Amino acid sequence: MISDSKGLWVRVPKSFIPEDFVMCLQITHGVRPQLTGKEYKSIAKIAFHFGFSNTVRYCEQQLIKINEQPSLIIKNFKMAMNFNMERYMIHLLIHIGSAKQLVNFLSKLDLEEMSSEFMKAFVAKFLFL
């Protein structure tokens, strides 16, 4: 939690970085900086926490643009699920090469928490492998 000069408290994510929050606000107000994938992920987390859906979408778009060949790690799938990044999830799914790899990711994800859109994307990928 962070307080201001008036003693008002604001709940922030555990891994809160003030510079990323400032950049999140900049993006929310129309600034379009060139950042790294790690920075976009951190900003998307902050933006999702505060409900800045347009900023989350912008970060999602930039992650897709930066990572034409994304690393297929479970952390990226969980981030897409947690921040409701449907396009990024589909971008990741496109790069899965085998049914075994897909089943491996599904076994590590919490299917109960997955939205119906994400489930549809996984089923479609499974059917077309």
Image (tube, rainbow, N blue to C red):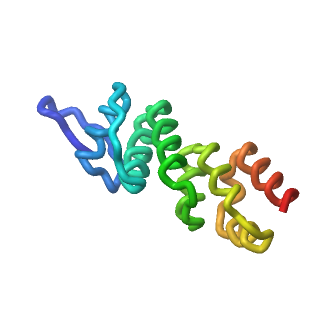
Image height check: is 29 above or below 43?
above
Residue extending farthest to the top is 29
Residue extending farthest to the right is 127
Looking at the image, which residue is at 63% across and 56% down? 92
Viewer-proximal residue among 121 and 32: 32
Q: Is residue 127 left or right of residue 50?
A: right
Tell me where residue 27 appears, x and y as whole percent: 36, 33
Viewer-proximal residue among 62 and 75: 62
Tell me where residue 116 appears, x and y as whole percent: 75, 44
Looking at the image, which residue is at 71% across and 69% down? 107
Q: Is residue 104 left or right of residue 78?
A: right
Which corner quadrant of the image does residue 7 belong to? top left
Which corner quadrant of the image does residue 43 belong to? top left
Tell me where residue 46 appears, x and y as whole percent: 38, 44
Q: Quadrant of the C terminus?
A: bottom right
Q: Is residue 121 left or right of residue 67?
A: right
Looking at the image, which residue is at 66% across and 52% down? 113
Q: Is residue 23 left or right of residue 106?
A: left
Looking at the image, which residue is at 33% across and 39% down? 33
Image height check: is 87 above or below 128?
above
Viewer-proximal residue among 50 and 124: 124
Image height check: is 122 above or below 44?
below
Which corner quadrant of the image does residue 122 belong to? bottom right
Tell me where residue 4 appears, x and y as whole percent: 17, 34
What is the count of numbered marks? 0
